[in-house]
Image: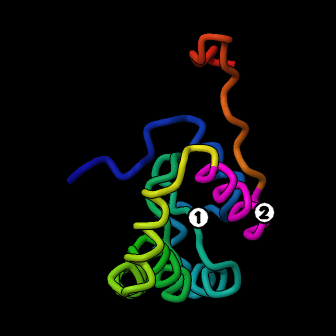
Amino acid sequence: MPNAAPSSSGAMDRLKRDLSSVSATHLAAGMQNVTRTVLSEGAVVITRHDKPAMVLMSVERYLKLEQAAEPQLDALTRKFEDLFARMQGDAAAQAMAGAFAMTPQQLGEAAAEAADASGRAPAKPPARTAAGKTTGA
């Protein structure tokens, strides 16, 4: 069985500071009180030899943690499929053909207009030397 206590002292200090603490001995002797504390506060740190060994938490808190850890694959899949479907239409094909036909100047202006319409500031182009090379500024 792996060591249940966190290895970093910072994590141990955070557990002691943020959660109620109960020794394993007191847990065995006073499960009713510990249960009340878990249900009112959400979690309790169980200590063994004065060191955090485990966390006893409510089912509600556990389910929230579990849900937060799961990727929202269904929502991401729907979002991808919607985006992909929009990219397959005639309008998207015409827009891409138009973009490829634009000069660099026209493309830059179109990008700036799109950024303004979305409320985002357009990125500033890099500075160029007289020879047309990027200076990296």
Question: Toward the viewer: 130 or 55?
Answer: 130
**Label 1 Cα crowd, 10 Å radius (few <14 / some 14-19 / many 20+):** many
Residue in the image at 56% along x and 62% along y: 45
Looking at the image, residue 55 lies above or below residue 2: below
**Extreme left residue here?**
1
In the rendered structure, which amino acid carries the disc numbered 1?
Val
In this rendering, the answer to whether 96 lies above or below 9 is below
Quadrant (top left, top right, bottom left, bottom right) of the N terminus? bottom left
Considering depth in this image, is 86 or 99 the residue closer to the camera?
Answer: 99
Q: Label 2 crowding class (10 Å Cα cut-off): few <14, some 14-19, many 20+? A: few
Which of the 4 quarters of the picture holds residue 75?
bottom left
In the picture, which quadrant includes the C terminus? top right
- Read off the residue under disc 1: 22
Q: Secondary structure at mark 1?
A: strand
How many discs mark residues in the rendered view? 2
Q: Position of residue 41 (x, y in %)?
A: 69, 78
Given residues 62 and 55, the one toward you in this image is 62
Q: Mark 1 or mark 2, which is nearer to you?
A: 2
> Residue 59 placed where, x, y %?
48, 87
Q: CA distance from mark 1 to mark 2?
A: 57 Å
Picture coordinates of residue 78, whole percent (x, y): 38, 88
Magenta stretch contains residue 40: no
Label 1 close to label 2 by CB (< 8 Å): no
Q: Position of residue 11 (x, y in %)?
A: 56, 44
Q: Residue at x 42, y 67 (%)?
A: 96
User: Relative to residue 104, is residue 84 depicted above or below?
Assistant: below
The overriding secondary structure of the stretch rendered in magenta is helix
Using the image, tell me which numbered label, if any, was put on residue 116: 2
Q: Which residues are magenta?
A: 106-120
- Disc 2 secondary structure class: helix
123 sits to left or right of 64: right
